Amino acid sequence: MDKCTCNADGKAGGKKEGIKMERKQLIREVDEILKTYCEGCFLKSHFRKTRGKKYAHQFCIRQCTVGEKLKKYGDRLS
């Protein structure tokens, strides 16, 4: 049985449209994670004040579980 490749608006689409929709969804999820966990983060704010912007950024990427999750999203988007 063939799969339907219609978009949500009912127009025929192919693999390319599906990839675009997946990218958009991933970006939405990243945005939601940033808004929920990173905006107003006490650790990020503390490290920016005490050790600088670069250290705070590296901490978020390498040691924070949220940052690790965001890195995985980034890998999927690239």
Image (cartoon, rainbow, N blue to C red):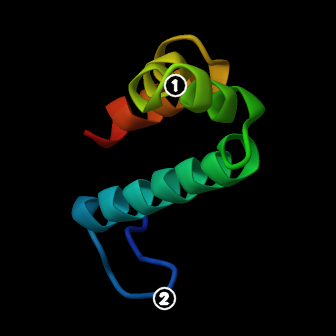
Q: Secondary structure at mark 2?
A: loop
Q: Is residue 24 above or below residue 74?
A: below
Q: Secondary structure at mark 1?
A: helix
Residue on which the image places disc 2: 9
**Location of residue 72 by image quarter:** top left
Q: Residue at x 30, y 68 (%)?
A: 17
Residue type at the position of mark 2: Asp
Q: Is residue 13 above or below residue 28?
A: below
Left or right placement of residue 21 versus residue 19 in this view: right
Residue type at the position of mark 1: Ala
> Where in the figure is residue 24, as x and y percent of width and height?
43, 62
Of the numbered discs in the image, which one, if any, rests on residue 21? Answer: none
Of 48 and 77, which appears nearest the observer? 48
> Where in the figure is residue 61, as x and y percent of width and height?
47, 22
What crowding class fits label 1: few (fewer than 14 Cα within 10 Å), some (14-19), or many (20 or more)? Answer: some
Q: Is residue 26 visible?
A: yes
Task: Name the N-terminal-most of marks 1 and 2.
Answer: 2
Q: State which quarter of the image contains the C terminus.
A: top left
Q: Residue at x 57, y 11 (%)?
A: 63
Left or right placement of residue 68 versus residue 35 in this view: left
**Location of residue 4 by image quarter:** bottom left
Residue on which the image places disc 1: 56
> Where in the figure is residue 44, as x and y percent of width and height?
63, 31
